[in-house]
Image (cartoon, rainbow, N blue to C red):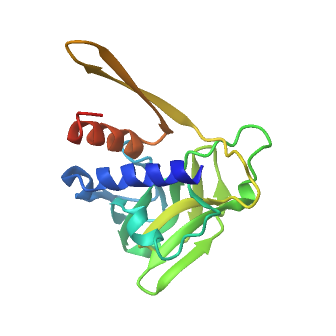
Amino acid sequence: SQELCRVHLALLNLALSSPFLSVPCRVHLPGAGSFRCSETELGFEVRAAVTVQYRYDSWDQHLREWSTPEWLVIGPLFNIQAEPATAVAAVHLPHFLCLAGTVTDISQMRIIHFTDEGMTLEEPTGVRPSHVVLENPSFSLYGVIFICLSCLRIPVHSLVLIYQALRLADTTLHLYLIPNDWISSLRILLWKVHSPSH
């Protein structure tokens, strides 16, 4: 499973080099309420008017010096800024861990927070089927990991992508089972476009 995680991270980082993903999303929320981005599934609860800017970032670039074999990435890494930051009551970070049944120990979910000073692991203030909640965040880089101390299998929501390679002599199907997040799908697509021989 560690090998699959490395493949997933490699595909994630390939897609992150896309110009589309390096452009931050910026939204002004005019007052108190909730907001969820339809593209990234990132959500915010706000107390007052606020301008939020966010974009995907590279797990590989930031996790390289901190990661242990027990840490499994279970969602995208976001670079988030808010002005004023105190207007944001909570951030809802998407994850693809399957919480159905009793197999998954949600107490092992952590929000990883990278700052200029280093890295911290924070316990979520809430766990939802597709998001973890962190109240009163201080913004920079946030993502969700799972600490897998004795797990052999971690259930995740997945997508099956099938690509057909047409050649004169034969037809080849490429099947990919990936975590159910938009960024993973885009990474596979970009990888297929940049390496058509696969």
Percent x, y of residue 104 = 74, 48
Percent x, y of residue 185 = 38, 38
Position of 30 relative to 186 (above/below): below
96 or 51, which is in the foreground? 96
- Residue drawn at 52 percent across, 48 percent down: 4
- Residue drawn at 41 percent across, 64 percent down: 60
Query: Would residue 142 be found to the left or right of residue 52 on screen?
Result: right
Q: Quadrant of the C terminus?
A: top left
Q: Residue furthest right?
A: 102
3 or 103, which is in the foreground? 3
Q: Residue furthest top?
A: 169
Position of 134 relative to 187 (above/below): below
Is residue 198 at all visible to an observer of this figure?
yes
The quarter of the displayed image where residue 57 is located:
bottom left
Percent x, y of residue 126 = 66, 58
Q: How many callouts does the rendering have?
A: 0
43 or 107, which is in the foreground? 107
- Residue drawn at 54 percent across, 68 percent down: 112
The quarter of the displayed image where residue 194 is located:
top left
Q: Residue furthest front?
A: 169
Is residue 137 at all visible to an observer of this figure?
no
Percent x, y of residue 159 = 49, 32
Position of 135 relative to 35 (above/below): below
Q: Residue furthest bottom?
A: 117
